[in-house]
Image (cartoon, rainbow, N blue to C red):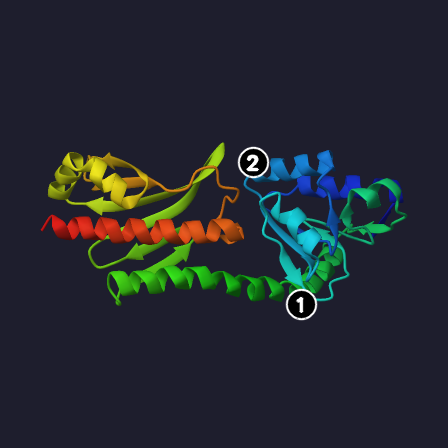
Amino acid sequence: MKLIKPSNISGEIMTLMEEADQKVILISPYCRFKYWKKLLNKFKILKSRNIDIEFYVREGEGETIREVEAINIKPITVPRLHAKLYLNEKEAIVSSMNLSKSSDDSSLDIGYKTENEREYLELVDFYKRYILKHKKQNSSSIGNWEEKIYEALCQAIDPTLSMNIEENIIQINTGLNNYEVFIANDRQCFLRLNGILSQHEFQQAQYNKGELENNIGCRIELIEGRYGHYDMIWATGLENMESDSFDFLNSDEIEKVINVIIRFCVEVDNFKMSCR
């Protein structure tokens, strides 16, 4: 491994982030970077390139968790975490330095960067053996809000409906309809929902758009299907969201997302029933 001089450690970590092709793994128990403009800009660049970011912090460190959440990344908490490790697909840095501006400004830290595949794989093995399992443990709590949606829809519509989440898309089949929900990102993040309409339902929806929009509680669009595509009803549920993925919803957004999805599916299903 190559020794990194103390004054170069943060620069090497940021270069590692820049040179990622698909994924960055950041393991830093304590973080203080809200005034560290250079690092914050690196996070923005990673997001603009659609680089996946896994960010591990020490469990119970509230201020650190809030710092990471403030940049729209959901931190993964690890009990008693003290290791500091930074990886992309090709190289890794192990260091005594946390992602903290004060550490960069005034702390005396040491760091080493991998120079070959064997060294890199040793650190990847450490990550897989001791760190990665906490991602699964953290993600299990996400199912709580998914379960709320599923149970509410089963009660309101059909106990046999199905629901699946894959690649940031929620797919719901109520028996009457197929729905999709996702977070769109076009300069700003917003919740988008859609469902299928028959030709008759589409015509009725055009006549009753105002009432339907009021019942759903969202701005809706009616898109006529062409070239073999279905007629669709689209809604924009939440605008100016902080999160760009269902994996990273903050506590305020979770309740809003739950309510919008339930109301949209229930009201569109009720509308379809009224058209029979």
Mark 1 nearby-residue class (10 Å; few <14, some 14–19, many ≥20): few
- Residues 83 and 126: in front is 83
Quarter of the rendering containing residue 121 = bottom right
Label 2: which secondary element: helix
In this view of the protein, can residue 133 be seen by the observer? yes
- The correct choice, above or below, for 222 with respect to 141 in the image is above
Label annotation for residue 41 = none
Q: Position of residue 171 (x, y in %)?
A: 34, 54
What residue is at 26 percent from the left and 46 percent from the top?
195
| Real-space Cα separation, disc 1 to disc 2, in angstroms | 30 Å
What residue is at 48 percent from the left and 37 percent from the top?
240
Q: Position of residue 122 (x, y in %)?
A: 73, 61
On screen, residue 39 versus residue 150, left or right, reads right
Quarter of the rendering containing residue 191 = top left
Identity, as a three-letter code, of the amino acid under mark 1: Arg
In this view of the protein, can residue 168 be seen by the observer? no
User: Cβ–Cβ below 8 Å for labels 1 and 2?
Assistant: no
Number of labels in the image equals 2
Mark 2 nearby-residue class (10 Å; few <14, some 14–19, many ≥20): few
Q: Which residue is mark 2?
A: 48
Q: Earlier in the sequence, mark 1 or mark 2?
A: 2
Q: Residue furthest top?
A: 187
- The correct choice, above or below, for 6 with respect to 96 in the image is above
Q: Position of residue 265 (x, y in %)?
A: 28, 52
Identity, as a three-letter code, of the amino acid under mark 2: Ser
Q: Which residue is mark 1?
A: 129
On screen, residue 69 versus residue 197, left or right, reads right
- Residues 117 and 17: in front is 17
What residue is at 72 percent from the left and 34 percent from the top?
37
Label 1: which secondary element: helix
- Residues 136 and 191: in front is 191
